[in-house]
Image: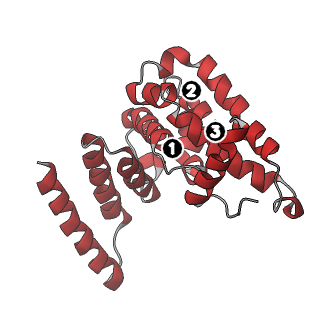
Amino acid sequence: DMKQAREILDAVEEHLSDIDWSYGIDPAARSSFHRAAAFMYQEKNDPPSFYRESMRYLLYTPLAAIPKKERGPLAFKIAVAALISPKEFGLGDLLQQPLFSEFLPTCEQYSWIMDFVQALHDGVFAKFDQAIVDHKAKWEAVPELKKALESDDLKQKMSLSAMMEMAFQRPKKQRSAIPFDDIAKACRVNDDQVEDIFRKTMCAGLIKGSID
């Protein structure tokens, strides 16, 4: 019963917050709470909430505390959720977690997903294109990732990430006037789509600016 599970988790969270303010709390309790919350959102097929709670779980959970047999599947599920969640762009916090910085690159079964994560984080289409080619058989076997790639949802996320990275990589004095041609090239869009990409990037809170 998902409704009852949500009610129980809400009650536990309120209780943990009260204890946290007054006495402090063992990180293991927080870890268990966020693990349960992440599992609930996974069952509800809610990738953004699953990703959020999983990141909180990792914040309170040393890599050594995660059972070895769970590390690969967990890292993979979190990575896929990060990729398909529409509002997740800068993945620096994810990449800094030991589960991803230390374990996943060495995991033969799941390490390929890191190529997509790194491409999105860097906003580099060349890396994204290469990952699509190199891992075609693997991503086609993951329904939610296949859908995101074939519907261009992930490509649009890449365009927004590329827009953000292009702005940040330019010298500070040149950020105030970025030609539409440069944006179109970096974001892999037509000239008539640049304004839309720029607006979406601003709406996502990735950059600040105005259109002249």
Q: Report if the CB atoms under discs 3 and 2 are less than 8 Å apart.
A: no
Task: Report the Cα–Cα distance between label 3 and label 2.
Answer: 10 Å
In this picture, is 80 found above or below 29?
A: above
Task: Report the Cα–Cα distance between label 3 and label 1.
Answer: 15 Å
Q: Residues within 10 Å of mark 2 (few under 14, many from 20)?
A: some
Q: Residues within 10 Å of mark 1 (few under 14, many from 20)?
A: many
100 sits to left or right of 123: left
Q: Secondary structure at mark 2?
A: loop
Res 121 seen here: no
In this picture, is 207 found above or below 113?
A: below
197 sits to left or right of 32: right
Q: Amino acid at mark 1?
A: Leu
On the image, the x and y values in percent for residue 109 come to: 49, 23
Q: Earlier in the sequence, mark 2 or mark 1?
A: 1
In this picture, is 111 found above or below 61?
A: above
Q: Quadrant of residue 100?
A: top right
Of residues 90 and 59, the one drawn nearer to the viewer in this rendering:
90
Q: Nearer the viewer, mark 3 or mark 1?
A: 3
Of residues 114 and 85, the one drawn nearer to the viewer in this rendering:
85
Q: Secondary structure at mark 1?
A: helix
Q: Earlier in the sequence, mark 3 or mark 2?
A: 2
The residue indicated by pointer 1 is 99
Q: Amino acid at mark 2?
A: Trp
Q: Secondary structure at mark 3?
A: helix
Q: Report if the CB atoms under discs 2 and 1 are less than 8 Å apart.
A: no
On the image, the x and y values in percent for residue 193 come to: 65, 41
Of residues 159 and 41, the one drawn nearer to the viewer in this rendering:
159
On the image, the x and y values in percent for residue 28 come to: 34, 60
Q: Earlier in the sequence, mark 3 or mark 1?
A: 1
Name the disc covering residue 112, or none: 2
Quadrant showing the C terminus: bottom right
The residue indicated by pointer 3 is 118
